Amino acid sequence: MARSTVRPAFLGKTALVGTGSTEFTKASGRSVLSLATEACRLAAEDAGLPLADIDGVLSFSFNNDSVPSQAVATSLALPQPRFLLDISMGGQAPAYLVMQAAAAVNAGLADNVLVFRALNGRSGQRVGSTRVPGMAADFRYPLGFTAYPQFIAMWARRFLVETGGGAEDLAAVPIAQRAWAAMNERAIRRTPLTFEEYLATPMVADPFRAPDCTTEVDGACAVLVTSTERAADLRRRPVIIQGAAYAAGRGSGLDAGDALLWDDLSRNYTSLLANSLWGGAGMAPGDIDLAQIYDCFSSSVLFALEGLGLVGRGEAGSFIREGNTLPGARLPVNTSGGLLNEGYLHGMNTVVEAVLQLQGQAGERTVESAETCVVTSGALTDGSALVLAKGKAA
Amino acid sequence: MTTAVGRTGSDSEAFWADVEAGGLPLRRCRHCTRTFVLPLPSCPYCATEDPEVIQAKGTGSVYSWVVVHHAFDPAFDGDVPYVVAAVQLDEGARVYGRLEGIPFDAIAPDLTVERVAPAGDGRPPLVFRPLARTPA
């Protein structure tokens, strides 16, 4: 079927120039607005840009668990915002919102745009167990099919069926990512994990055990998007947005947990957007040095590595088990420890980690030689991805 | 209005009322004849409006499944561990249901299943069991 091959006009002309994150905690004791304001303020400071120069703010929320961009603009005393956008979305949103920010900057709707996610996701409403609003939810809940770990386990099981995989393939993900988490002070789970220890952890939704599931946190993350032109005058090495794509498949569902019309639960949106992502970036999977994959659950890393073509079908588990994603190896994956270990800042922290890496600001886990990084947002029937490239040092 | 566990009395109410009475209603497209469970105003495959409602036989095969060990909604605490399966009905539509009458480690893809008559008493309204045991 013919598909548009139009390349987004902002590619190569926009950049990520700053990041900000609060602490990740189990009970912040603070308002979401306070968390959002701190992360946004830090992102502007990181870039060396006065708050008064920020004229756009974008964010996403799930079940009204956050605050509007307008409130954050007010809290930051922005003199005259020109572009504010709030969307109701889940983990598909972070890369997608960076795309919207870049498009707005390139179209002249705004000059310097903050993208944030803030939530008391542990002490307040928890995404993992909240009732997903929407029409299809009523067809799951009366059966006791009520929560994301269960919805995504249904995909993971079919993936294992189709690829001939097993528990060792899922386990490989948290085991490898713990090696990275050990170097990340912000990570909630930092202790090493062996396969034997993994097998001794409680089942949550078979095939998922506890380490296959993210850990929810309170906190906020923000990134700052601007033009490559303005980026050249800022404090950090710019991270160029070289590729970007969002895709939702036919029958992508009536709500954020719906997959009743999705024929092949062993493939997610990453299979759909790979061609436009790589085509737009003018790159191939082999050109990628780092991958930051949205990992609300372990299986989504396997889906994305295969869907993006970074490994072949059915090879993701063995690729990770063989050590290829570890520190010092050929394709480091989820170098913060991922959502599984760093905590569930809903994938905004996944984007932040990509930027920190290419800025050279990820501390001892920085992969100095990395020039390019792919980032994904989402795990199911729709999602987004970016290809980022290291710009010239400031 | 909450009418039963997990139900909000919206578009699904007619479906569950029929299921509790022993039926299993599907939508079938009047043009492409594909079937689906969700009460859409038009066919999700060809956009033809006004699908007809048919009754499924209640037989199909297991496409995927989850063994729930932790109930995130306390209403289901007393049920764990239990199995939710995605069942590919013989009419083509996929539907979720509980799967009972088989050890967890014996569940396999393409296991053929049939609908169990609804038990009432607040039990899950849609339950499947293996259609026939594979000879040893």
Image (spheres, rainbow, N blue to C red):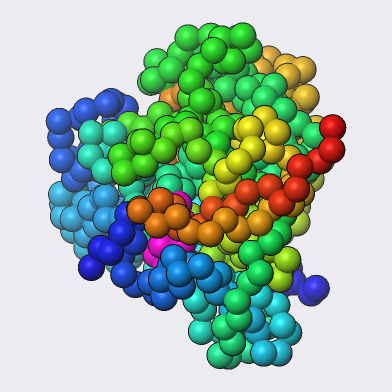
- Along the viewing direction, whichever of A60 and B25 lies nearer the viewer: B25
Which residue: 84% across, 32% down?
A: B136
Q: Which residues are magenta?
A: A134-143
Q: What x and y, as percent, mark residue B12?
A: 41, 70
Say whether residue A255 is visible: no
Q: Residue at x 20, y 30 (%)?
A: A28
Residue, x 40% and y 15% (percent of image)?
A: A185
Relative depth, front residue between A23 and A29:
A29
Question: Which quadrant of the view contains residue A23?
Answer: top left
Q: Quadrant of residue A82?
A: bottom left
Residue B123 percent location from the top left of the image: 40, 51
Residue A101 on image: x %, y %: 44, 58
Q: Main secondary structure of the magenta part?
A: helix
Q: Nearer the viewer, residue A261 or B121?
A: B121
Magenta span has A136? yes
Q: Is residue A194 above or below residue A23?
A: above
Is residue B135 visible in this depiction of the protein?
Answer: yes
